[in-house]
Image (cartoon, rainbow, N blue to C red):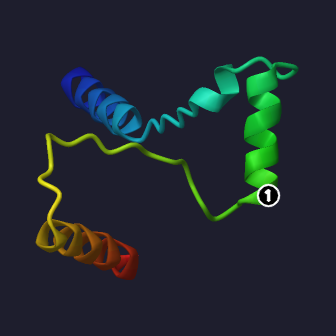
Amino acid sequence: MIILASLAMFRAGIWGTYMIRVDYDPIHLVPKRSYLKQWIDKADEEFPNDGWGVSIYTEAIPYTVENFEKIDQAGTAKINKQ
Protein backbone atom coordinates (compact mmCIF):
# COMPACT_ATOMS: atom_id res chain seq x y z
CA MET A 1 0.00 0.00 0.00
CA ILE A 2 2.83 2.40 0.86
CA ILE A 3 4.57 1.60 -2.44
CA LEU A 4 1.38 2.34 -4.40
CA ALA A 5 0.87 5.63 -2.57
CA SER A 6 4.51 6.56 -3.16
CA LEU A 7 4.23 5.74 -6.87
CA ALA A 8 0.99 7.76 -7.14
CA MET A 9 2.62 10.79 -5.49
CA PHE A 10 5.71 10.39 -7.67
CA ARG A 11 3.54 10.25 -10.77
CA ALA A 12 1.60 13.34 -9.66
CA GLY A 13 4.89 15.15 -9.04
CA ILE A 14 6.21 14.26 -12.49
CA TRP A 15 2.92 15.37 -14.08
CA GLY A 16 3.00 18.64 -12.11
CA THR A 17 6.57 19.30 -13.16
CA TYR A 18 5.66 18.66 -16.77
CA MET A 19 2.71 21.09 -16.57
CA ILE A 20 4.80 24.05 -15.30
CA ARG A 21 4.63 26.89 -17.82
CA VAL A 22 7.36 29.48 -18.10
CA ASP A 23 6.35 32.76 -19.69
CA TYR A 24 9.55 34.76 -20.04
CA ASP A 25 9.32 38.23 -21.53
CA PRO A 26 12.53 40.25 -21.24
CA ILE A 27 10.55 43.49 -21.56
CA HIS A 28 9.27 42.88 -18.02
CA LEU A 29 12.86 43.37 -16.83
CA VAL A 30 13.11 46.89 -18.30
CA PRO A 31 12.42 49.62 -15.70
CA LYS A 32 8.97 51.17 -16.23
CA ARG A 33 10.16 54.78 -16.36
CA SER A 34 13.14 54.19 -18.63
CA TYR A 35 13.49 55.66 -22.08
CA LEU A 36 13.71 52.14 -23.55
CA LYS A 37 10.38 51.14 -21.97
CA GLN A 38 8.75 54.32 -23.32
CA TRP A 39 10.12 53.55 -26.77
CA ILE A 40 8.87 49.94 -26.64
CA ASP A 41 5.41 51.05 -25.53
CA LYS A 42 5.23 53.68 -28.29
CA ALA A 43 6.43 51.20 -30.93
CA ASP A 44 3.79 48.69 -29.81
CA GLU A 45 1.15 51.41 -29.97
CA GLU A 46 2.15 52.81 -33.38
CA PHE A 47 3.19 49.56 -35.07
CA PRO A 48 1.33 46.67 -33.40
CA ASN A 49 1.80 44.17 -36.23
CA ASP A 50 5.34 44.97 -37.35
CA GLY A 51 7.35 43.02 -34.78
CA TRP A 52 11.04 43.73 -34.21
CA GLY A 53 13.49 44.89 -36.84
CA VAL A 54 16.48 42.78 -37.80
CA SER A 55 19.82 43.26 -39.47
CA ILE A 56 21.20 40.80 -41.98
CA TYR A 57 24.96 40.53 -42.41
CA THR A 58 26.47 38.83 -45.44
CA GLU A 59 29.85 38.42 -46.99
CA ALA A 60 30.90 40.56 -49.93
CA ILE A 61 28.36 40.57 -52.76
CA PRO A 62 29.54 41.19 -56.33
CA TYR A 63 27.58 44.15 -57.67
CA THR A 64 25.93 42.69 -60.74
CA VAL A 65 22.36 42.96 -61.95
CA GLU A 66 21.88 39.19 -61.63
CA ASN A 67 22.87 39.22 -57.96
CA PHE A 68 20.54 42.11 -57.16
CA GLU A 69 17.70 40.28 -58.94
CA LYS A 70 18.38 37.18 -56.82
CA ILE A 71 18.37 39.27 -53.63
CA ASP A 72 15.13 40.96 -54.68
CA GLN A 73 13.52 37.60 -55.45
CA ALA A 74 14.58 36.21 -52.06
CA GLY A 75 13.18 39.24 -50.25
CA THR A 76 9.93 39.11 -52.23
CA ALA A 77 9.57 35.39 -51.52
CA LYS A 78 10.07 36.04 -47.79
CA ILE A 79 7.45 38.82 -47.76
CA ASN A 80 4.94 36.72 -49.72
CA LYS A 81 5.53 33.76 -47.40
CA GLN A 82 4.28 35.77 -44.43
Q: Residue 65's spot in the image, x, y percent?
A: 18, 72
Give the position of the N terminus as an image quadrant. top left
Placement of 6 over or under 53, stated as above or below: above
> On the rendered structure, is 50 left or right of 9?
right
Residue pushed farthest right? 33
Question: Which element carries disc 1, helix, strand or loop?
Answer: helix
Q: Quadrant of residue 78?
A: bottom left
Residue type at mark 1? Glu
Question: Can you say whether 58 is above or below 10 in the image?
Answer: below
Please state which of residues 25 and 4 is positioned toward the viewer in this rendering. Answer: 25
- Residue 46 is left or right of residue 82, and the answer is right
In the image, residue 24 lies at what x, y percent? 53, 32
Work out whether residue 22 or residue 29 is closer to the camera in this orientation and state it: 29
Residue displayed at 51% across by 48% down: 53
In the foreground, 5 or 65? 65
Could you say which is closer to the camera, residue 67 or residue 33? 67
The residue where tag 1 is placed is: 46
Q: Position of residue 23 (x, y in %)?
A: 54, 37
Classed neighbour count for the residue bearing mark 1: other residues with Cα under 10 Å, few (<14), some (14–19), many (≥20): few
* Residue 41 versus residue 76 in the image, above or below: above
| Residue at image coords 39%, 75% | 79
**Picture coordinates of residue 18, whole percent (x, y):** 34, 38
Residue 35 quadrant: top right
- Identify the image quadrant of residue 49: bottom right
* Residue at screen point 32% across, 45% down: 56
Quadrant housing the C terminus? bottom left
